[in-house]
Image (spheres, rainbow, N blue to C red):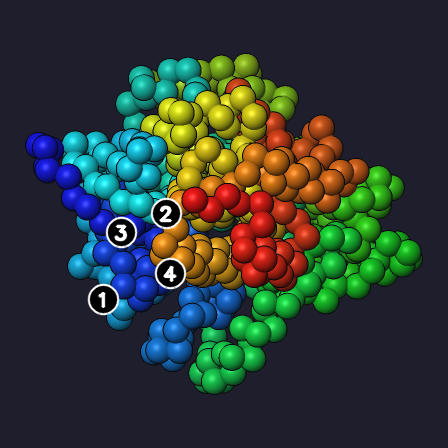
């Protein structure tokens, strides 16, 4: 590594998760010389690092997998309806082998800087070890939930027990048996991990800052023959998936056929009918009536009903009350849970409600809140991510005129055109950048679309003898306005809705809603029209 040698390529892909692997495959099909640079020592990306107990996808395996290859679809067998982390990791290794991807992936290689050379119209990509790569195109397949958020709790470094992070959980796992354990964070990750850790730990303390709205998980193994039957109908399933709309909001179309689909409008139903639906479909499932995202009265009703439903499960009234969110229903992605509320009926589980009793510090032997000090052997942080932008702000990305992407996003907010490019950063393609539909869709379906659009664009440029493509500032500004207009007046813009969707979970990050909620079908159509019209809103040079 290091030295003066510069490797010239046609494209550099950063990251070897779901999107980086597909980007490599597609770019290679176009005949490009490509290298994937991956910080880890193996493929998997997000699904490699997030190997905490209970880690599972909330989208069905038949939809959370590559659709582009009949061979991959027909040769792989999913064992469970909702795939667990280990099976997804195994699947990505299978895909990497089957498509012979590893020979173009350089592992243990973290990108430190990417600089656009305006004279040469190429990117110089520098690794932490000092290696240098030059290529006209860069695909940042760096993930949207990949940059861990530092919990920033005083005293953390003094803790003498085991400190664990859900988003970089040890490969060898961790046995909580006989231990006094804290889990900090009750988002999707905490809610998945807590019931599993509770079964092992001698005592589990759950430190909750914001309560979660959850939906009972349909997770189960496939019945014998069930997956094979689904696999025989893959074409039909994938076609339907791309058109899928879920009536959660007047504008939304999540491109997920299952889990949330087909729920009744309960708003006008009787109280009895509402409670029955809650029992049958779970709280979140029953409450996804069509106006819940926009109608303040529906939102209030939903929150109240949710509290009643939690109180039916959790026996201790104070714990039950603490488990009810104080922010409006519908403002975050619903979380799937497997026995989450029941866990709080266990004698070895204690909920610490940080809204009433905030953490003061971590000590060498435990956690001190205003009211108590709990002795601990292990702390598991499930505190989330600097989402959407964090992976790229950790790299020195310099575009035209030396513009630093980190500064652009700090001052303007997380801007991008179509979630695919940021103006002043020519030929740098984002996958699911801010403003893409992915976080309100099936991530995989959205990701495949983005990679196909990007690689078609690269092919178009090369065929026409063009060197660069870049988003026009005006098109980028209009796209942001459009995204915000779609959620304006919805619960998503409520001042109490703090989440990674609007950056409010990261101290100092500019708050801005970042997801296009009108759905993947309309997004795809827009992108197709833009390309067909000669890349409207982009400047080709
Ligand atoms: P999330 O959804 O961002 O959840 C993080 C949780 O950690 C959330 O409950 C936070 O509370 C809590 N948190 C964060 N920092 C702290 C500190 N310092 N002290 C106490 N509690 C804290 O991340 P996940 O990993 O669960 O899920 C991310 C996505 O992955 C999810 O949306 C799915 O799409 C898959 P807060 O809400 O900020 O008050």
Task: Single out the mark in the foreground, 1 or 2.
Answer: 2
Q: Pointer 1: what residue? A: 100
Q: Identify the secondary structure beneath mark 1.
A: loop
User: Pointers 2 and 3 in contact (CB under 8 A)?
Assistant: no
Distance between the alpha carbons at the discs numbered 2 and 3: 11 Å
Q: Position of residue 429 (x, y in %)?
A: 42, 46
**Mark 1 neighbour density, 10 Å: few (under 14) some (14–19) many (20 or more):** few
Task: Single out the mark in the foreground, 2 or 3.
Answer: 2
User: Pointers 4 and 2 in contact (CB under 8 A)?
Assistant: no
Q: Quadrant of the C terminus?
A: top left
> What residue is rendered at 40% in x and 78% in y?
70
Q: Position of residue 235 (x, y in %)?
A: 51, 79
Which one is earlier in the sequence, the residue at label 2 or at label 3? 3
Q: Identify the secondary structure beneath mark 3.
A: loop
Q: Pointer 4: what residue? A: 463
Q: Pointer 3: what residue? A: 10
Distance between the alpha carbons at the discs numbered 1 and 3: 19 Å
Left or right relative to 359: residue 36 = left
Which one is earlier in the sequence, the residue at label 1 or at label 3? 3
Left or right relative to 2: residue 78 = right
Q: Identify the secondary structure beneath mark 2.
A: loop
The relative height of residue 410 versus residue 451 in the rendered view (above or below) is above
The relative height of residue 264 versus residue 213 in the rendered view (above or below) is below
The image quadrant of residue 218 is bottom right
Q: Identify the secondary structure beneath mark 4.
A: helix
């Amino acid at each position: 590594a290091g030295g003066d040698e510069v490797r010239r390529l046609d494209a550099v892909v950063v990251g070897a998760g779901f999107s980086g692997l597909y980007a490599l495959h597609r770019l290679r099909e176009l005949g490009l010389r490509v290298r994937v640079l991956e910080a880890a020592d193996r493929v998997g990306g997000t699904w490699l690092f997030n190997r905490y107990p209970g880690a599972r996808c909330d989208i069905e395996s038949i939809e959370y997998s590559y659709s582009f290859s009949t061979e991959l679809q027909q040769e792989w067998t999913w064992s469970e309806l909702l795939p667990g982390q280990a099976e997804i990791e195994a699947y990505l290794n299978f895909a990497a082998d089957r498509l012979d991807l590893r020979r173009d992936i350089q592992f243990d290689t973290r990108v430190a800087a990417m600089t656009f050379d305006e004279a040469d119209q190429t990117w110089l990509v520098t690794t932490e070890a000092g290696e240098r790569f030059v290529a006209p195109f860069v695909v940042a397949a760096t993930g949207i939930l990949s940059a861990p958020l530092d919990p920033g709790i005083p005293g953390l470094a003094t803790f003498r027990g085991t400190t664990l992070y859900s988003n970089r959980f040890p490969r060898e796992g961790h046995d909580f048996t006989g231990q006094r354990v804290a889990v900090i964070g009750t988002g999707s990750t905490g809610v998945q991990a807590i019931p599993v850790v509770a079964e092992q730990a001698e005592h589990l303390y759950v430190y909750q800052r914001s309560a979660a709205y959850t939906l009972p998980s349909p997770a189960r193994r496939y019945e014998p023959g069930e997956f094979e039957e689904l696999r025989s109908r893959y074409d039909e399933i994938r076609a339907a998936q791309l058109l899928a709309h879920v009536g959660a909001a007047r504008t939304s179309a999540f491109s997920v056929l299952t889990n949330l689909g087909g729920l009744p409008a309960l708003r006008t139903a009787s109280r009895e009918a509402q409670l029955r639906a809650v029992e049958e479909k779970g709280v979140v499932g029953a409450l996804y009536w069509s106006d819940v995202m926009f109608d303040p009265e529906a939102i209030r009703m939903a929150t109240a009903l949710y509290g009643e439903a939690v109180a039916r499960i959790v026996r201790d009234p104070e714990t039950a009350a603490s488990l009810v969110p104080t922010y409006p229903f519908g403002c975050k992605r619903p979380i799937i849970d497997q026995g989450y509320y029941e866990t709080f009926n266990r004698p070895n589980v204690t909920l610490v409600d940080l809204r009433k009793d905030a953490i003061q510090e971590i000590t060498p032997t435990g956690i001190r809140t205003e009211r108590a000090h709990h002795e601990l052997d292990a702390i598991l942080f499930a505190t989330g991510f600097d989402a959407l932008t964090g992976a790229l702000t950790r790299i020195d990305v310099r575009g035209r005129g030396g513009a630093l992407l980190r500064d652009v996003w700090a001052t303007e907010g997380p801007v991008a055109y179509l979630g695919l490019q940021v103006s002043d950063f020519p030929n740098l393609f984002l996958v699911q950048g801010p403003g893409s539909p992915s976080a309100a869709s099936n991530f995989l379906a959205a990701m495949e679309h983005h990679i196909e659009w990007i690689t078609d664009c690269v092919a178009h440029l090369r065929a026409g003898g063009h060197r660069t493509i870049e988003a026009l500032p005006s098109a980028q500004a209009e796209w942001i306005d459009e995204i915000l207009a779609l959620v304006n007046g919805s619960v998503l813009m409520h001042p109490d809705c703090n989440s990674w969707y609007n950056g409010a979970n990261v101290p100092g990050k500019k708050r801005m809603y970042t997801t296009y909620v009108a759905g993947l079908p309309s997004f795809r159509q827009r992108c197709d029209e833009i390309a067909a019209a000669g890349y409207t809103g982009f400047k080709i040079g």
